[in-house]
Image (cartoon, coloured by chain):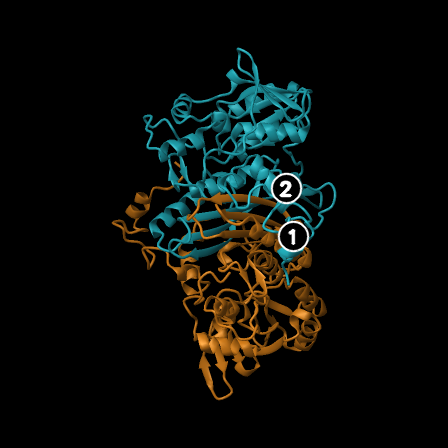
Chain colours: A orange, B cyan
Amino acid sequence: MSSVDVGDRAAAGTLGGEGRSPFRDAVVTLKHGAGGVAMRRLIETLFVPDMPDIGHHQIGLRQLDDGAALRVGCEWLVFTTDSHVVHPIFFPGGDIGRLAVTGTVNDLAVMGATVPLALALGVVVEEGFPMVDLARIQDSIRAACLESGAPVVTGDTKVMGRGEMDGIVLSTTGVALTRTVVTDAGLREGDRIVVSGTIGDHGIALMALRHGLDLGGGLRSDVAPINGLLHRALSVAPGAVHAMKDPTRGGLSGALHEMAAKSGVEILIDEPEVPVSEPVRSAAEILGLDPFHIANEGKVVIGVAADAVTEVLDALRGHPLGAAAAAIGICRSGTPGRVVLDTGLGRRLLPEIEGEPLPRIC
Amino acid sequence: MSSVDVGDRAAAGTLGGEGRSPFRDAVVTLKHGAGGVAMRRLIETLFVPDMPDIGHHQIGLRQLDDGAALRVGCEWLVFTTDSHVVHPIFFPGGDIGRLAVTGTVNDLAVMGATVPLALALGVVVEEGFPMVDLARIQDSIRAACLESGAPVVTGDTKVMGRGEMDGIVLSTTGVALTRTVVTDAGLREGDRIVVSGTIGDHGIALMALRHGLDLGGGLRSDVAPINGLLHRALSVAPGAVHAMKDPTRGGLSGALHEMAAKSGVEILIDEPEVPVSEPVRSAAEILGLDPFHIANEGKVVIGVAADAVTEVLDALRGHPLGAAAAAIGICRSGTPGRVVLDTGLGRRLLPEIEGEPLPRIC
């Protein structure tokens, strides 16, 4: 038998038997996929334990980074996967195809692997899905592959019956080689926190679309491959970029909390410096959402040595995708994992939320 | 804009405009995911064209092999992905977790990469899915990882709303390094065709379960990682294994047709030599299915030089997963791509079908 009988685990107490469970919930809920505390708890309890060992000095499941990094000769093979369930599949600024390529390319890039080697693409589609929509998505995939230099080299196609799945799910996996890996855990005291542009654009654009909120076309997803942008930022200050993360599900807040906790530092954010576009600010207010907690799909949070922050900012701002880059904070001792907001009027803690408030955002 | 406007393609004639399409169907149907002619046509028309070039002497999307193979230093990086939508998720002999690991490990192995480096796992699950079932699937994943030596090193978790997806979909991607790549296109005239065991077990077991057909417990999926088995077969006769493929969706027939067409040979199969278990034979008859067209999840079709067939067969039979291995045919000139069955009473063409007759078989 391949599967360990649930009864065995129940008897051993790990599932508690009699329908009880070590998880707080008896069933999966939307928050388990929302990129926050609930999802991390699920992954740490369920997916991480007892995997075959991959040895020291490698980055695997346990590190919960944007991907894995495995030693291959004198380089690192960076390896990352994402399944995309975004709804609706076409939205201002992009679609599920562009999102699938971008999400994976960006996860490679924030680990320092800015030259992707190849992508694998798994397509699961519902019976009855319009072929013209599939063609449109494929055009978008192809365009994003050309833009990022990441070819799809292998794939898989599955069809589920009508009503068995809502539309289409794309799973993208990327591989890349790099000499230097950047993790999300490398922040040091004194490092500056840089964000490559405005926050909240992707999530707010989708949410506005779902609610039929029209702000004169100003709301667009920021979905874009940022490997070229990061290649530039890493080149100008070798060794000065200590940590990176893309603030997708859970938004800037989620990324900052994760980086602070893993790095053992406290982050102080200068709130007025955080770039938020006017349409996003307005829509977020109407929708009752905080852009800090909303997904981005073309942004990066960088922890950089203080003496290199000007070069890195200049490099980012010289690229179309980094024009609004800003230094927004600093790492300091204090309470590791804590993120403090200086609002200009006072200081408060940035709360760590259970997860992205918007389902199927990516 | 990332996506090419469908209107542009229509104007250029590739979509034909006015709702017409170069595809035979206006919508996706079950056969587009069924591993046969219809799926190949969709992939070749839609997914393959105009991808960024990966250079000569590499194996990419265009080759439609079980995975890609990319040159990395003096080795090959083999890279393969599969999304798993099997229904029901628990079945005799395995479950979706074991299937997900096995499917990917076997795709690496049939390309000659019998020592997997790592797996990436994307989980998409429906809101309300029982946590105990998720734990049971994860136990099964872990067990299959240990069995095959393939650790999951990175992953992704998404939740879709209640009714937006039927249960759970697992997408698994594997990477492995190998000095020698084996393709599905390397058959030569005179090669013997070997199959590593009985055929049809996986698909028939699932179909019998769906129909409530009970043959006294004799029907079980063959789902198993065969990388250890293939490692053995490749070691005993270096260079003599010219082609391999795992006969999953589309069954033995699909694998033989694809190998014959890509290799430019005709295959003659000695039908009485093809191993089929008694329960599978009986159930297939009752269900009106031909085991030749039914999915396997722990088998391989090997094309081997005639003078090495005995060593390879002995090596396979010495392993628990290859006990019923048999030489079932020969490659010859004739009509490239054709598969001829010698039934013992006469000869007939083995038809190439549109696809696996069973939806959500893997």
Q: The residue under label 2 is which amino acid type?
A: Glu
The location of residue A168, given as percent across then percent down, is 50, 52
Q: Is mark 1 on a helix, strand or loop?
A: helix
Left or right, residue A203 beside residue A320: left
Depth check, front residue: A355 or B288: B288
Q: Which chain letter goes with mark 1? A: B
Q: Name the residue under label 1.
A: B10
Q: Distance between the residues labelled 1 and 2?
A: 19 Å
CB-based contact (under 8 Å), mark 1 and mark 2: no
Q: Residue B105 carries which label?
A: none
Quadrant in which residue A247 is drawn: bottom right
Q: The residue under label 1 is which amino acid type?
A: Ala
> Looking at the image, which residue sits at the far top?
B345
> Looking at the image, which residue sits at the far front?
B18
> Looking at the image, which residue sits at the far bottom?
A345
Depth check, front residue: A48 or A195: A195
Residue at the location (60% across, 63% down)? A110
The location of residue B245, given as percent across then percent down, is 58, 32
Q: Which chain letter goes with mark 2? A: B
Query: Height in image: A311 above or below A95?
Result: below
